[in-house]
Image: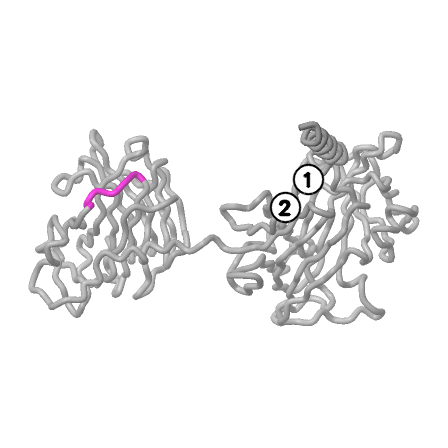
Amino acid sequence: MRQRSLFVRALLTLIAGWIALGFVTPAAAVVVTPTTPDGWAPANVRTNATVAITTAQPRSGAGSLEFTTNTITPGQDKADYEKTWTPTDFPARTLSGLTALSYEYYRDSSSTTLAHLAPVLRLYVVDVTPTSPTFGKYALLIWEPAYNGTTPTPPVPTDQWITQDILNGKFWLFVPSGQSIPSGVVQNYNVTLNDWITGSPVGQPGDPAPINIDANTLVFGINVGVGSGWGATFRGFVDNVTARWSNDEVHANFEPDPAFRCIDILLDDFNRANTTKGLGRNWTGATNTYRIAGNQAQPFTTAGTIFWNAQPRVFGADQAACVTLAQIDPNGKHHTLILKAQSVTNYTRGMILVSYDATSQQVIVETVEPGQSGWTTRLNVPVVFNHGDVLGAQALADGSVKVYRNGVQIGTATTSPFFVNRGGRIGVWFHQTSGALFDDFGGGNTTP
């Protein structure tokens, strides 16, 4: 019993030591998506540049972080993507404690800016030495390919991913304005992180003085970006940004949001004999205003509301519906999904419509509920659907409606308290859209 007590006391002492040293539980590589950004966000995006997570050049999955510039106004060709944190929350994330620092970048051959330019990586650092004259001031340490190669600067290889370990590379320093100290670039491009920590690098005459950087200096953010002042055009990508402090790691793998796969919940593929009218017993409502034609469904001019009628019929407060627009009627305003319908005979009891209007090339979300005199428009999304595209929607328990084209979200509508925590029926309504054909109706209960 005494041996167990001694072991427990020793373990508690060890844990206390870890806490005192700022020990942090190892962090797993994080998949960063537009809806789960893990603190990452666009920053400093000017009018001639863009940054977004896209599928254009996948690296470690389905996507990466894409940057573009098209310089029209000098200096407006800049875009960054960054993550910052409160320094005191991570006291072990010192500049001197970094054990790994890397990222991957890609320069597209369509770029017309200078050949040595590619996305850069910046570290936010803050002086936390109380006796320092710049205590509490911060700066950015910047690594870029142009200052980490031979002279003259070689061009960056194009159309290929470059994995860059930059821990022992050369970083220049920028002091942002608004800190009651001189700001600007410290022009010394031949300095490693260790040089900044152990030496006293300075810039050129007229440059601002660097902030104090020493063994205590904390890292409180990571930034990747392009521009400004590059001129012409640039297209490139970044992925797998990694900073490590022994067992603590910031690692961002940039990926698109998972595609909405409502069509996997297929309810009706319409693969059956042609009919003069009607779609079969799994549908209810104005079914005689539709027919089967060539293994697809075709609406008549008088087409009304129809609802899926196989069990469970009524779906929950988180529900989805989708349909393939096999043929779009160019004059049709109502290639429409129905969600959370409260009645199959009286639409005024409550219903959500998600319609593709081919005449105005937009998706419209509308609702009606008891006591309301007409339809209320909740969302208009400019978008073009082509023959064969899938219109999808989720109507969720919080009252929101997410709209999708081919599984990619294109908009979100807010409805009203009436639809919060409320289920209902799903269906379609191709009102005065007789030139259309639809196929592969799907839906049911879903997860947000």
| Residue 246 against residue 135 in the figure, above or below | below
Amino acid on which disc 1 is placed: Val
Q: Residues within 10 Å of mark 2 (few under 14, many from 20)?
A: few
Q: Which residues are magenta?
A: 312-317
Residue tagged by mark 1? 24
Residue tagged by mark 2? 27
> Are the residues at dot 2 and dot 1 in contact (C-beta closer than 8 Å)?
yes
Amino acid on which disc 2 is placed: Ala
| Residue 268 against residue 135 in the figure, above or below | below
> For this rendering, which residue is in front, 288 or 445?
445
> For this rendering, which residue is in front, 56 or 36?
36
Identify the image quadrant of the N terminus. Answer: top right
- Is 86 on the left or on the right of 390, as rendered? right
Callout 1: SS? loop
Q: Position of residue 302 (x, y in %)?
A: 12, 54
Q: Position of residue 49 (x, y in %)?
A: 60, 55
Which residue does the image show at 62% across and 68% down from the upper left?
Answer: 108
Identify the image quadrant of the C terminus. Answer: top left
Number of disc labels: 2
Residue 300 appears in which quarter of the rendering?
bottom left
> For this rendering, which residue is in front, 127 or 302?
127
- Is 112 on the left or on the right of 98, as rendered? left
117 inside magenta stretch? no
Residue 12 appears in which quarter of the rendering?
top right
- Is 191 on the left or on the right of 387, as rendered? right
Q: Residues within 10 Å of mark 1 (few under 14, many from 20)?
A: some
Callout 2: SS? loop
